[in-house]
Image: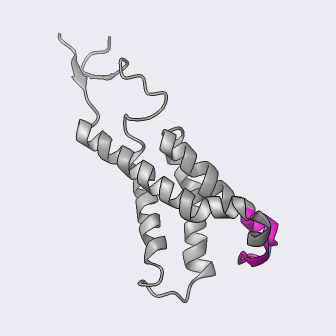
Amino acid sequence: MKTIPFISSAPQTDLGLFFLRLSSSLLLLYVHGLPKVLHFHAELARIEDPFGMGPYMSLLPAILAEVVCPVLIILGVWARLACLPVIGVLLVAMLFVHPDWSVAEGQFGWLLLIIFITQAITGPGRWRIGNNTKQGLHYGTSK
């Protein structure tokens, strides 16, 4: 019996997932992550502390979610797992730090939340670091 290669997604889907990963992660990194790293001490003075852990312990998870995780997502390395801290920080920001914001005021945060939840569901696609395209999934009998 002939084995038929199983293609998980069309090339356009992989391009779309790559564009989504790249654009959303660069946006998060540029707008939120890099300013926190470059102006660390100033950020310590003004970061919100919704759970009373102190500014340092509030800033570190934000830096992880807004600097380290976007780099992993761009590369497609542990992308689904890397979306989880981003989603967590966004949920804390939208539900605990800014609960009084209207949908219009918080639309950037809600859109980022939608985008990173979508990436956590779909995964990175085939355009990622470490993807061995010669090794494919096969439908039917095993090789």
When the figure is inspected, residue 85 is found, relative to residue 136, above or below; the finding is below
- Residue that appears at 43% across and 49% down: 21
**Is residue 75 rendered to the left or right of residue 135?**
right
Q: Where residue 115 sits in the image (x, y, percent)?
A: 41, 60
When the figure is inspected, residue 143 is found, relative to residue 89, above or below; the finding is above
Quadrant in which the N terminus is drawn? top left
**Is residue 131 rendered to the left or right of residue 32?**
left
Out of 41 and 112, give the one closest to the viewer: 41
Q: How many numbered dots are placed on residues in this image? A: 0
Q: Where residue 73 sits in the image (x, y, percent)?
A: 51, 46
Out of 131 and 31, give the one closest to the viewer: 31
When the figure is inspected, residue 97 is found, relative to residue 91, above or below; the finding is below
Out of 45 and 59, give the one closest to the viewer: 45
Specify how the rendered protein is coloured: one colour
The part of the image, by quadrant, that contains residue 8 is: top left
- Magenta segment, which residues? 44-59
Q: Where residue 40 sits in the image (x, y, percent)?
A: 76, 64
Furthest residue in direction left, as rendered: 1
Q: Where residue 41 sits in the image (x, y, percent)?
A: 80, 67
Q: Is residue 60 magenta?
A: no
When the figure is inspected, residue 105 is found, relative to residue 129, above or below; the finding is below
Q: Is residue 49 magenta?
A: yes
Quadrant in which the C terminus is drawn? top left
The part of the image, by quadrant, that contains residue 104 is: bottom left
- Residue that appears at 31% across and 47% down: 16
- Residue that appears at 71% across and 77% down: 48
**Is residue 54 rendered to the left or right of residue 77?**
right
- Residue that appears at 42% across and 22% down: 132
The part of the image, by quadrant, that contains residue 53 is: bottom right
Furthest residue in direction front, as rendered: 38
